[in-house]
Image: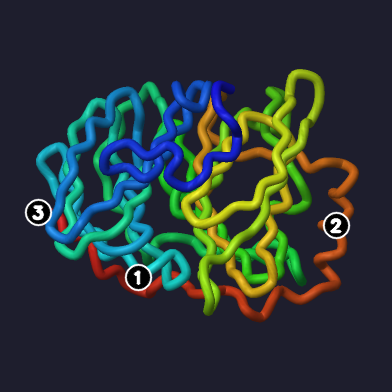
Amino acid sequence: MSTSPHLRAGSTAIGAYTTSIDPESAGWGYSSLRVLELAPGQGHELRTGDSEWAVLPLTGSCDVSCDGRSFTLAGRRSVFSGVTDFAYLPRDAIARISSAGGGRFALTGARCATRLEFRYGPASGVPVELRGAGQATRQVNNFLAADTFEADRLIAVEVLTPAGNWSSFPPHKHDTEREGESVLEEIYYFEIADGPDGPGMGYQRVYPSGAGHATDVLAEVRSGDAVLIPDGWHGPSMAVPGYDMYYLNVMAGPDPERAWRICDDPVHTWVRDTWAEQAPDPRLPFYSRPAHGSGGTDR
């Protein structure tokens, strides 16, 4: 990998993108992430090239046009306020993203071979899942999980962890080609809730999983930070007391089957067995998916 695994907010900014990570800068083969900031009334052209992309509002709403069609994404006030709709962009396309009110929009990408259709993903269709129990409870918005929305290689989900809880735990990996495990490069992109006197923080751990897998990170993460995980056990993601944590996971890899298969660190997998005796954290879910969508106009 050609860069540090911990990328601080703004360190990869290019033009309209406050975060810009691609396979070349990451030193791997597939996964990409850009965070686009638009002022009110501003638009941006995206050439998708050899990758498929999803447009995911972090704050605000937008219109997305591609292949002679256009969808309105109703979006949300913040990542902590609700599930959002999204748009899927095919490879080898020219798309335009515009926002009357302005906002920030995550573009999750993966190099791929197959060109699929430009499509709209309604917020009402995003499965919201609770994982873990007790202080390991977290919420997962499976908007582009392998089994919830069709793509060629791209997998992307959102995880929300209440203040004081640990997520991505037990530590797990997906870096070895074998039965029961996928090979996936992964990006964690963080947003941390502010406190009454300033911005919040959290922590992320990644450690080596064996010969040739040497990624080692213990990082204090703040809003806008990203962590690259080409290999290794990853977890926990720690939301410190007082500050809720959000992260966006972007994954893709060389396996012909688009699947998320993981292997727990065997030292810590026993923790899963304790969840049956614990209640989920009552603070979750932060929100549920809406019964009906408010965006998606095709024109």
User: Relative to the observer, which residue lies in front, 219 or 292?
Assistant: 219
Q: Residue at x 45, y 39 (%)?
A: 11
Mark 1 and mark 3: Cα distance apart in space: 25 Å
Q: Residue at x 75, y 69 (%)?
A: 135
Q: Nearer the viewer, mark 2 or mark 1?
A: 1
Q: Nearer the viewer, mark 2 or mark 3?
A: 2
**Lower position in the chain sequence, tag 2 or tag 3:** 2
| Quadrant location of the N terminus in the rendered image | top right
Name the quadrant containing residue 232.
top right
- Give the amino acid type for the residue marked by disc 1 in the picture: Arg
Other-residue count near label 1 (Cα within 10 Å), few / some / many at <14 / 14–19 / ≥20: some
Q: Is residue 147 visible?
A: no
Q: Secondary structure at mark 2?
A: helix
Mark 2 and mark 1: Cα distance apart in space: 35 Å
- Give the amino acid type for the residue marked by disc 2 in the picture: Val
Other-residue count near label 3 (Cα within 10 Å), few / some / many at <14 / 14–19 / ≥20: few
Colour style of the rendered protein structure: rainbow
Q: Residue 20, how many percent across, how many down?
A: 39, 37
Q: Residue at x 28, y 64 (%)?
A: 60
Contact (Cβ within 8 Å) of mark 1 with mark 3? no
Q: Which mark is residue 299?
A: 3
Q: Nearer the viewer, mark 1 or mark 3?
A: 1
User: Which residue position is annotated with label 1?
Assistant: 77
